[in-house]
Amino acid sequence: MTLTSSEAFITVAVMALGTLLTRMLPFILFPDSKQAPAYINYLGKVLPYPVMGLLVVYCLKNVSLVQSPYGIPEAIAILCVVLLHLWKNNTLLSIGAGTVVYMLLVQKVF
Amino acid sequence: MERQIKAFKAAFPHTIPVMTGYLFLGIAFGILLTSKGYHFVWAVAMSIFIYAGSMQFVGAELLASAFNPLNAFMITLMVNARHLFYGLSMLVKFRGTGKYKPYLIFGLTDETYSLLCSCDIPDNVDKNQFMFFIAFLNHIYWVVASAAGALLGSMFTFSTEGIDFVMTALFTVIFINQWKSRKNHVPALTGLAASVMCLLLFGPENFIIPSMVLIIAALTIFRKSVEKGEE
């Protein structure tokens, strides 16, 4: 544990509250009596797509391209995930195999 | 009681794919968190009270860095911002769910949301109880799997270095699924381009908020063509 128990407790509580807030807010802003504007509906429909790209980049944010191993394990593992998923279209297989490949690469190869 | 059993029986089969996914990811989360030196009780508590897959993986990283609750709160809002839109599209569906409503809102994960959107509720089954069991069963899978992973993680001593890649793989797979489900790729490309650009400009610690702003701006500017592209 990096944090003390009370620091960890506060961090977990803050994450629980933040998560609840994101799930509750629409119901607070648009109670049963009110209709959401068209612009909000549009964003609601379309935002999941860019958010997923953002999350992929977020996962890779600390990968350095100028320092060894130059992001090579990440590039290989992601390529595996993409190819396997386009080939077999099996979510669990793609995630599982990609993760195993990455773990082998960072533990045994690089 | 009989009505509840009926709703349970109708809901359970729909949750089987999610059970499979949550077992795998929940175990991975449990292992990841214990690999950071946290007791399995922490994994269980996080899965009960936070109950957000991707956020908990990010949370494991936050718990392994310096104490910064404001940062943790902001990251939670950013990572979970998409839930805002799940809520928006459930406004109508959750109307009249009465005492179940608070829990249904609390349990609105990516997977529960997609099940609630996609499955047809049989006419002879109580709609509220059906939705409750979808949410509740998923929650149970997640908590049980996290506990199992955390226990396995502390029993075995094999190296778990790199297991956090499971999150990258998950988002990559969802990204591909979404890509295939749409004709217009402007939103997906906007997300990648804006995030990479902001990462290079603002650095790894500060790029999420500018990315979100840029994404919203781009989606607003390109609204006409995005909406037209999906006709």
Image: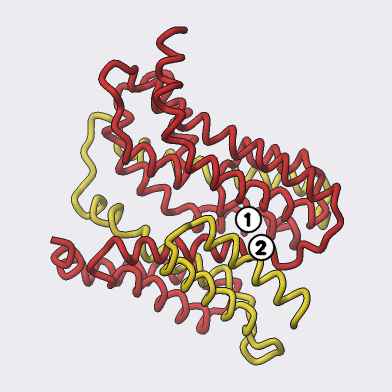
Q: In the picture, residue B108 is in which quadrant?
A: top left
Q: Position of residue A30 (x, y in %)?
A: 29, 38
Q: Which residue appears farthest toward the front when viewing the image? A: A88
Judge whether B95 appears above or below B177 on screen.
above
Q: Amino acid at mark 1?
A: Phe
Chain A drawing hue: yellow
Residue B59 coordinates in the image, percent (x, y): 65, 54
Task: Residue at 41% x, 53% y: name it.
Answer: B82
Q: Say which quarter of the image contains residue A86.
A: bottom left
**Where A29 falls versus B137 (above or below)?**
below
Residue B30 to residue B139: above or below: below
Quarter of the view holding residue A58: bottom right
Q: Report x, y in % for residue B51.
A: 57, 41
The structure residue drawn at horizontal position 52% and vertical position 63%, both measured from the top left corner, is A94
**In the image, are marks 1 and 2 on the same chain?**
yes
Give left or right: position of B212 versus B180: right
Q: Earlier in the sequence, mark 1 or mark 2?
A: 1
Q: Which residue is mark 1?
A: B57
Front position in the image: B137 or B90: B137
Marks 1/2 in contact by CB < 8 Å: the verdict is: yes
Tell me which chain appears red.
Answer: B
Query: Which residue was labeled with disc 2?
Result: B164
In three-dimensional space, the C-alpha distance between marks 1 and 2, rounded to whole angstroms, equals: 7 Å
Describe the element under mark 2 as helix, strand or loop.
loop
Residue located 42% across and 61% down the image: A89
Q: Chain of mark 2?
A: B
